[in-house]
Image (cartoon, rainbow, N blue to C red):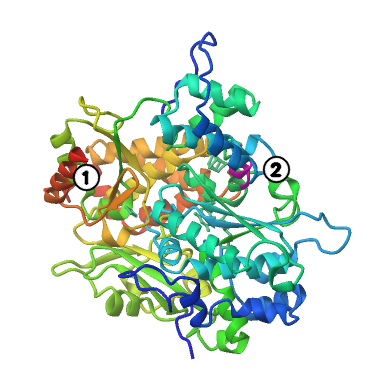
Amino acid sequence: MSQQVIASTAKKARKLSAPEIAEIEHEMTLYPDKKAVGLEALKIVQKHQGWVSDESLLGIAKYLDIPVADLEGVATFFNLVYRQQVGKNVILFCDSVSCWIMGCEGIKGHIKEQLAIDYGETTEDGDFTLIPVPCLGDCDRAPVMMVGPDLHRNLTPEKIDSIIADYKNK
Amino acid sequence: MVANPLTKNIDMSRPPLDIAAYEANDGYQSLHAIAKGLSPDDVLELVKGSGLKGRGGAGFPTGLKWSFVPKGENSPAQKYLVVNADEMEPGTFKDRLLMEGDPHLLLEGMIIAAYTIQASKSYIFLRGEYTVSEKVLRNAIKEAYEKGYLGKNILGTGFDLDIIMHTSAGRYICGEETALLNALEGKRANPRAKPPFPQVSGLWGKPTIVNNVETICNLPGILTYGVDWYHGLTKGNDHGTKLFGVSGKVKTPGCWELPLGLPIRELLENYAGGMQDGLELKGFLPGGGSTDFMLPEHLDIALDYDEIAKVGSRLATGTMIVLDDRTCPVGMVGNLMKFFAHESCGFCTPCRDGLPWVDQIFRDFENGQGSEKDLQILHDHVTYLGPGRTFCALAPGATAPLGSGLKYFKEDFEKHITEKRCSYKH
Ligand SMILES: Cc1cc2nc3c(=O)[nH]c(=O)nc-3n(C[C@H](O)[C@H](O)[C@H](O)COP(=O)(O)O)c2cc1C
Ligand code: SF4
Ligand code: FES
């Protein structure tokens, strides 16, 4: 998401946790070199930490022995690698063409009202971050969005209200 | 005979078939045929003979593509098969259905393709957001290993194959096959120069075939039921069936497997139920966001690669996006331009700088600030971003709805300028 680069090389690499290392090691068996595991490692760390901090990124680069700049280049390239802290639940809101035709802008307005956040922002209680995402491949049930790993279809304002309530209680 | 080979096992109201149920419905028979002595060259001939064309967008003949892979003792020992499951083209929702609905069909197809080009490793490059597909496929892969259909010396053929799942992290450009290879190698996903083509020098410099999910899912039927059966499926010039989708304000949006060659009208009226009450069809993109608009007068054209090309558009992914008479065409094209501008990989100047400019002009139109000069700039970009002027096909893809939109909905653009507002907004 963020275009920010590591501001200070004074930052220290975080030592990766044992479960993170185990998963990264497994990925290393599937590719012929370490560089190829960079994105997988970023995703593994994000799964455990919620996002990829500068310290985590340095930690991965060190562990895989790949240049920090290369890894940062990959991290900033991909929409779903979060280089800033995100909320407990990330809402990926489809704003592509079929959802647009089916009125996703109104639905987005409703979310914005209910959660008091716009794209790229996190609610004050840290429960939700709202991010736009290209076509989620469910255009026949537009408008659609994901909350965490779950897909929600045929969205209406009422549905949004109950979805928000469900995840708040989780 | 089977008329819907891609979806015969799919029923989204229940979980997908497990390996035993899949096998009970003719599944994995092609592997037994291979084990009985079908050589890689035999399979290649069958696939060439079938006339199968790639379903990823470009429609390139699959057998021909495979035939470019070097073979024999002097060719590199390691070859790769990569399945392009990065579906992110706006308005496209077909590969998800195949993966979630019948994962073993994809795996069987992958084994056939990998055997033909003698690739011992295959990656599924899956869109990260497709969490259900990932789960379903991982489970199916496990079943296939347990059954001995994956791993070493498959069914005593001496052929080894590992299938590896790679989930991406959200960038449309990763669907472009050479950008996809860079992403798999852990690099920024900028496209590569061609030649060399991936068939000769692809993943880690080795011969590599990249095929779309739906393309691969055609293979089991061709081997199991034969080329003659496959040729009997079509109602037009191109062979086989295809997944066709319709989204937008129709009565029953959805995705269906139909023979190639049916009239567009049949898809729109019989399957998608026609337009919602009170709405008229104004136009449609026949195969996702990178295709040219077509008009109601084109409804009797066949859903066929060559027929649609004759009116200046492309069948591409076969998933149609419908524009009705109460939705602003300028807004629709603007939405697509925002997508393309955001997803430009930034490698070449016309695309990196041109698309955001185009996007900004559409925002101005939306706010009633569009001018005749802006309109000229949009027209100019249809040329500047067109085929041959950029490093890959992303930007030319954007010019498809842009150029055709400017042509067919000229009055709507003009009206935004003269009325200084979007008259579709109430
Ligand atoms: C910007 C861009 C995005 C693409 N996205 C996809 C995609 O998501 N899935 C896909 O199969 N092909 C996609 N393609 C087409 C691929 O480059 C490639 O042609 C295709 O995977 C080949 O498979 P096929 O021969 O089986 O059709 C894309 C092409 C471009 C230029
Ligand atoms: S056309 Fe766009 S997406 Fe393709 S290489 Fe150039 S900048 Fe990247
Ligand atoms: S446009 Fe929203 S899911 Fe396809």
Can you say whether A134 is above or below A129 in the image?
A: below
Horizontal side of residue B243 vs B278, given as left or right? right
Q: Mark on residue A105?
A: 1
| Mark 1 CB near ligand 3 (8 Å cut) | no
Q: Amino acid at mark 1?
A: Glu
Residue matched to label 2: A32
Q: CA distance from mark 1 to mark 2?
A: 45 Å
Where residue A95 sits: x, y (%)?
30, 46
Binning the other alpha carbons within 10 Å of mark 1 as few (below 14), some (14 to 19) or many (20 upward) gives: some
User: Element at badge 2?
Assistant: loop
Q: In terms of sequence position, does the residue under pointer 1 or pointer 2 come before the other?
A: 2
Q: Residue furthest top?
A: A10
- Tell me which chain the residue with mark 2 is part of: A
Closer to us: B379 or B303? B303
Which range is magenta?
B181-186
Label the magenta part by its dominant secondary structure: helix
Where residue B358 sits: x, y (%)?
40, 39
Q: Quadrant of residue A47?
A: top left
